[in-house]
Amino acid sequence: MKLLHTAIEIVAFAKSSATTAVSERGQAMAAPSRVRDRVAAGLMLIGALGAAYSCVSSVGRVLAADQATQQGEAWRMVGFALFAALFTLLAFRPRRTPWLWELLIANKLALTIIEALLISRHAADAVATTVADGILVVFMIAAYILSRGYASWRTR
């Protein structure tokens, strides 16, 4: 709960530093500020570093896995690499990729819910992954709002 409160404070602080601009239709709208973009980029780069670390640290699991699980472990490792790349892309180009924010948030939210449900079944690492992915979802939503990722729809 404290993490959610901190994320809300970050969003509120960054929102207060927003400037105004004029849209193509002549309507006043908040322009993305550098502070908001930097905070959002920082949050996404933290996610990218976590995903890259998970990718590198899972190499041992892939090599040690038996034939029945090696393909799944390799798929998981490559998925971490993909998420590291996508988080980095969103950190530096937050308003140029319609659907990407929404798809990544939905994916991580779905995984977090599934992991939370698996806790009662005593699945390996379910608590740790639920917490980690839950934090990541909060970071992603905060970054989406801060960077105005939803504005990517206006550019198309």
Image: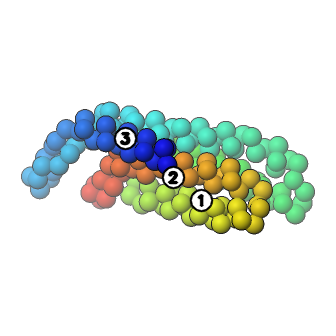
The numbered mark at residue 22 is: none
Confirm or deny contact between disc 3 and disc 1 (CB under 8 A): no
Counting the numbered discs, the total is: 3
Confirm or deny contact between disc 2 and disc 1 (CB under 8 A): yes
* Residue 16: percent from left, percent from top: 25, 38
Is residue 92 visible in the rendered structure shown here? no
Q: Which residue is mark 1?
A: 112
Q: Is residue 102 left or right of residue 151?
A: right
| Residue drawn at point x = 71 percent, y = 56 percent | 126
Please identify the quarter of the rendering in which residue 35 is found: top left
| Dot in front, 3 or 1 | 3
* Residue 65: percent from left, percent from top: 87, 53
* Residue 119: percent from left, percent from top: 70, 61
Mark 3 to mark 1 CA distance (whole Å): 23 Å
| Dot in front, 3 or 2 | 3
Mark 2 to mark 1 CA distance (whole Å): 8 Å
Marks 3 and 2, the one that precedes in the sequence: 3
* Residue 42: percent from left, percent from top: 46, 35
> From this viewpoint, which residue is outermost toward the front?
1
| Residue drawn at point x = 56 percent, y = 52 percent | 134
Marks 2 and 1, the one that precedes in the sequence: 1
Q: Which residue is mark 2?
A: 137
Q: Badge 2: how crowded within 10 Å, few (<14), some, or many (20+)? A: many
Type of residue at label 3? Glu
**Of helix, strand and loop, which one carries label 3?**
helix
Q: Badge 1: how crowded within 10 Å, few (<14), some, or many (20+)? A: many
Type of residue at label 2? Val
Is residue 105 visible in the rendered structure shown here? yes
Type of residue at label 1? Thr
The numbered mark at residue 9 is: 3
Marks 3 and 1, the one that precedes in the sequence: 3
Q: Is residue 28 left or right of residue 6?
A: left
